[in-house]
């Protein structure tokens, strides 16, 4: 029987007065998620919490395809609730990024919208499995800059997709094989804006599961920690 270990932390950071990030760790359902809200107090936190609540109530039974469909439908429902809430408030943009990891049998699956990320460490090699739905993310995909260069760009926080933004939620997805020893990292941008890709690989390659999330969060805090920071690390054994 496949076994999984995980470690998760979310932190307010040094500057914000409220944590607009929300995280979900349901190892008994092989389901994890990070959502980063935007829109300020009583808006961004509502959006990210709505995303997580929708995932919690998603049906958990069925084959992998049915589970993926349930996750997707839950995110679409969260989108509609956030849009309706913004209309009730007469507010401007309210939304939340999301990245979801789902394990099933010998495969992993993920959905995302926005710039919260999923990394994978396999055989000493790190990969960003998602691509940011952002102005700079599109530049990276076009080969105009690296991810590390994108973090320092003045438009690095301009998101092009999010739950609650636009009439229709556009989700990207990825699936692939799961190997023993795979280590996955889900995070909000409060982490990766302070830790570059090569250094992230060092952390993920060396740190034990018991302390890895706390170590990553503390590193971001030590380097400024101006945003909320959320980290989930999942090991397939």
Image (cartoon, rainbow, N blue to C red):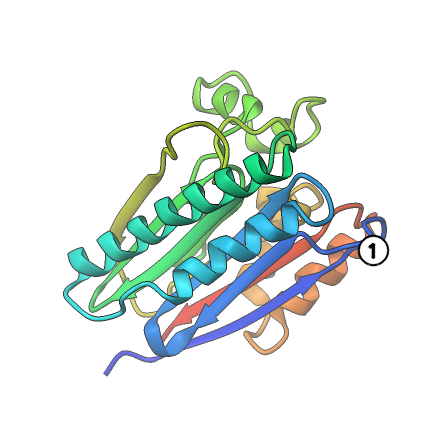
Residue 205 versus residue 51: which sits nearer the camera? 51
Q: Position of residue 172 (x, y in %)?
A: 34, 38
Q: Is residue 47 left or right of residue 169?
A: right
Name which residue lies at 16% across and 56% down.
Answer: 65
Report the quarter where the N terminus lies.
bottom left
Q: Mark 1 — residue?
A: 222
Q: Secondary structure at mark 1?
A: helix
Q: Position of residue 177 (x, y in %)?
A: 23, 57
Q: Is residue 104 left or right of residue 236?
A: left
Report the quarter where the C terminus lies.
bottom left
Is residue 101 in view from this perspective?
Answer: yes
Q: Is residue 54 left or right of residue 190?
A: left
Is residue 201 in view from this perspective?
Answer: no
Name which residue lies at 45% across and 67% down.
Answer: 234
Mark 1 nearby-residue class (10 Å; few <14, some 14–19, many ≥20): few
Name which residue lies at 41% across and 28% down.
Answer: 167
Compared with residue 87, is residue 46 higher up or lower down, i.e. above or below? below
- Spot the residue most to the bottom: 1
Residue 98 versus residue 88: which sits nearer the camera? 88
Count all numbered tags in the image, as a single digit: 1
Q: Position of residue 214 (x, y in %)?
A: 68, 68
Instruction: Kindly indicate the quadrant of the structure image that contains residue 95.
Output: top right
Q: Position of residue 8 (x, y in %)?
A: 57, 69
Name which residue lies at 68% across and 23% down.
Answer: 153
């Amino acid at each position: 029987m496949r076994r999984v270990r995980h470690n998760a932390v979310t932190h307010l950071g040094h500057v914000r007065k409220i944590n607009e990030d929300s995280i979900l760790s349901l190892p008994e359902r092989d389901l994890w998620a990070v959502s980063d809200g935007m829109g300020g107090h009583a808006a961004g936190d509502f959006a990210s919490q709505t995303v997580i609540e929708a995932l919690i109530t998603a049906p958990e039974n069925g084959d992998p395809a049915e589970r993926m469909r349930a996750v997707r439908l839950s995110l679409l429902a969260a989108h509609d609730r956030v849009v309706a809430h913004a209309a009730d408030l007469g507010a401007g943009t309210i939304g939340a990024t999301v990245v979801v990891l789902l394990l099933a049998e010998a495969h992993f699956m993920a959905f995302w919208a926005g710039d919260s990320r999923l990394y994978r460490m396999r055989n000493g090699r790190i990969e960003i499995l998602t691509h940011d739905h952002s102005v700079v993310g599109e530049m990276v995909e076009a080969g105009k800059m690296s991810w590390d260069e994108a973090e320092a760009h003045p438009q690095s926080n301009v998101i092009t997709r999010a739950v609650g933004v636009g009439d229709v939620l556009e989700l990207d997805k990825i699936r692939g094989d799961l190997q023993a020893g795979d280590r996955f990292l889900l995070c909000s941008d409060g982490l990766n804006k302070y830790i570059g890709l090569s250094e992230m690989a060092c952390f993920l390659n060396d740190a034990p599961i018991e302390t890895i999330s706390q170590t990553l969060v503390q590193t971001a805090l030590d380097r400024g920690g101006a945003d909320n920071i959320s980290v989930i690390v999942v090991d397939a054994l």
